[in-house]
């Protein structure tokens, strides 16, 4: 059973009806192929119309759709011979951050990703994609490793943010994030970050201080969640849709603000409706931006990356 | 002013529960111990409660005054794009910003100055918490970058006094990008061989803590300062646990290995001076070592090849 979002109710009804009719046909009833075709057409048009004008808040819901492909799906689909690497060498391995090496289009790369998990058990294991300090320290370690051996870094970001917990604070959550940002900025290798779902604040930028930042069409990237912003500035979490609008957290807006580099179109109805298709197009886009970066030396990459981030917030930049 | 107004009168007023409007500007109530402190005593004590030692929040101007030797100069910060998102909640961000500017006579929540500390040249950036909770947007980011550049230019250490609620959400992802941006600033200072010192003041949280503010060569905090990444309320709601006593206070961070020192305001200038002095001692070039003639381990002579 597909999970439908609130604003997809009319689509859900149509698709339910189609399914029902198909079942009657299969059971040897009257042939309703024509009717099914007509309804399919209608559902398709409705889906098109709905997704053509998603509000930022609706995009936030699509970005968090439980069936949306996660970091592990992109790694499985794009990386050959993946060797997972674990641990921060000090305290623990944090399963909220995936890391490892493998080949992308034949090239050896380092891969990082925040992983939410896709059923109750794996969600708990991955802490719903909210990393603790160990996760960011692992990321930093692997970025430094990538730098030493000349492996480009690919990251897949999908997190509500860093985990807000007592243990996380006690072990230096802020320092771990800061060092991870620093490691990304310092890496003498190409670094490409893709925001595949939710790019939540410090927990996202920890893995996205990159040369190029790509964003999926219905992904969001923000300094604070719409709900969090609404509860602070409107003193009412129910104003999340208004806050989502104000925060300019969609790929389109962030491209205009020169915060990200490109928006990757999603299959009609969102990435979860055709995971293989979106994973393939993400692969194509990464290869497109990686190719020219791979020709640059470490010092040039680092200098340009710095210049890019230093520009963000200068007069004339926005 | 005489002993009656300075001492007897407030005591009498406290005794009789007189209305508080008169003491408002002359007498200050400590928010920690609720005792009254005469404004001159408070100023003399650098806004540290003379009864309980509570370090009150102070603005950037006072901070610079307390930190430098006499005669420092503030620099003007480059203009930044204001309101990149044209953000509005119940009010327009542009209006909030203008109001904060009018109230504080500052362009944004940070002041940068250069001068000497105990005779050592230094650049200091100080947050103004009263300016939109010291939140970091493009203006504050620019302040940190400018301070770093100035430090490099003057071959002087950079000291940042933080007091911030975190990123300025009214600037959305632009404020988030100030995290990598200020991290780059710390690199500029460090790569020039200069010390970068952070003094965390009450409160320092969110995106400020999780970027440049945790990357000091030396991490100092004022006593009792609230320092953390996530807000206490968010943590409590997430873990549904009571937060431990003293959680996210300077002393807690010191105990957990996140800070080097907790330093009282009255000792701050002296401490900073001492640290700078130690880190800025000119390098002593070691004498050329004698060339080693004998190998440390004598290798056995090669064995003659075996013949059959």
Image (spheres, coloured by chain):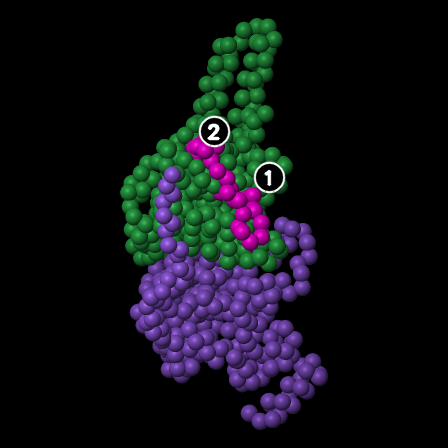
Chain colours: A green, B purple
Near mark 1 (Cα within 10 A), the count class, few <14, some 14-19 or many ≥20, is some
Nearer the N terminus, badge 2 or badge 1?
1
Name the side, left or right, on which A305 lies relative to A100: left
What residue sits 39% from the left and 35% below the top?
A104
What residue sits 68% from the left and 54% below the top?
B241
* Residue furthest right as drawn: B15
| Marks 2 and 1 close (CB-CB < 8 Å) | no
Chain letter of the residue carrying label 1: A
Near mark 2 (Cα within 10 A), the count class, few <14, some 14-19 or many ≥20, is some
* Residue furthest front as drawn: B308
Q: How many marks?
A: 2
* Residue beneath disc 1: A123
Q: Where does the magenta region start and end?
A: A74-99
**Front-lying residue, A135 or A59:** A135
Q: Are marks 2 and 1 on the same chain?
A: yes
Residue A105 percent coordinates (x, y):
37, 33
Chain letter of the residue carrying label 2: A
Residue A160 percent coordinates (x, y):
53, 45
């Amino acid at each position: 059973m597909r999970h439908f979002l609130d604003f997809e109710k009319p689509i859900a009804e149509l698709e339910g009806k189609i399914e029902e009719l198909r079942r009657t046909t299969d059971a040897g009833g009257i042939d309703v192929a024509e009717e099914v075709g007509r309804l399919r057409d209608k559902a398709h048009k409705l889906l098109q119309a709905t997704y053509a004008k998603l509000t930022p808040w609706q995009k936030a819901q699509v970005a968090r759709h439980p069936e949306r492909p996660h970091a592990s799906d992109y790694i499985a689909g794009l990386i050959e011979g993946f060797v997972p690497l674990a641990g921060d060498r000090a305290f623990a391995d944090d399963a909220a951050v995936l890391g490892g090496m493998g080949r992308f289009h034949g090239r050896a790369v380092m891969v990082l990703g925040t992983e939410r998990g896709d059923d109750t058990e794996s969600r708990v294991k991955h802490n719903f994609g909210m990393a603790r300090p160990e996760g960011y320290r692992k990321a930093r370690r692997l970025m430094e490793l990538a730098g030493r051996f000349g492996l480009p870094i690919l990251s897949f970001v999908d997190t509500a943010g860093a985990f807000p917990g007592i243990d996380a604070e006690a072990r230096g959550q802020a320092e771990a994030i800061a060092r991870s940002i620093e490691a990304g900025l310092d890496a003498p290798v190409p670094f490409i970050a893709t925001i595949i779902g939710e790019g939540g604040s410090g927990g996202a930028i920890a893995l996205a201080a990159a040369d190029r930042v790509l964003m999926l069409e219905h992904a969001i990237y923000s300094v604070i969640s719409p709900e969090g912003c609404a509860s602070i500035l409107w003193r009412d979490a129910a104003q999340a849709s208004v806050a989502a609008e104000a925060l300019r957290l969609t790929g389109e807006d962030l491209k205009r603000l020169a915060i990200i580099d490109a928006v990757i179109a999603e299959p009609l109805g969102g990435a979860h409706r055709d995971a293989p298709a979106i994973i393939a197009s993400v692969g194509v886009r990464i290869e497109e931006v990686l190719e020219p970066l791979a020709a640059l030396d470490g010092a040039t990459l680092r200098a340009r990356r710095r210049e890019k981030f230093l520009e963000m917030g200068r007069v004339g930049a926005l | 002013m005489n002993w009656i107004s300075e001492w007897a009168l407030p005591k009498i007023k406290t005794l009789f529960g007189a209305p508080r409007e008169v003491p408002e500007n002359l007498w200050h109530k400590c928010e920690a111990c609720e005792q009254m402190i005469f404004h001159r005593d408070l100023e003399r004590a650098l806004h540290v409660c003379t009864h309980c030692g509570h370090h009150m929040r102070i603005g950037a101007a006072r901070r610079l005054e307390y930190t430098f030797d006499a005669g420092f100069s503030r620099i003007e910060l480059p203009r930044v794009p204001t309101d990149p998102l044209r953000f509005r909640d119940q009010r327009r961000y542009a209006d909030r910003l203008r109001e904060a500017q009018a109230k504080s006579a500052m362009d944004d929540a940070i002041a940068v100055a250069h001068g000497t500390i105990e005779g050592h040249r230094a650049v200091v950036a100080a947050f103004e918490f009263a300016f939109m909770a010291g939140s970091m947007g493009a203006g504050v980011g620019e302040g940190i970058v400018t301070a770093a550049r100035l430090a490099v230019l003057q071959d002087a250490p950079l000291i940042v006094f933080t007091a911030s609620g975190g990123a300025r959400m009214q600037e959305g992802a632009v404020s988030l990008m100030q995290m990598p941006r200020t991290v780059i600033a710390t690199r500029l200072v460090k790569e020039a061989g200069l010390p970068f010192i952070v003094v965390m003041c009450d409160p320092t949280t969110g995106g400020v803590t999780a970027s440049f503010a945790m990357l000091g060569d030396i991490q100092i905090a004022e006593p009792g300062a609230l320092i953390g990444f996530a807000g206490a309320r968010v943590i409590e709601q997430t873990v549904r646990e009571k937060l431990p006593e003293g959680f996210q206070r300077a002393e807690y961070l010191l105990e957990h290995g996140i800070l080097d020192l907790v330093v009282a305001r009255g000792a701050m200038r002296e401490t900073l001076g001492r640290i700078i002095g130690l880190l800025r001692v000119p390098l002593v070039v070691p004498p050329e070592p004698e060339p080693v003639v004998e190998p440390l381990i004598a290798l056995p002579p090669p064995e003659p090849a075996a013949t059959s």
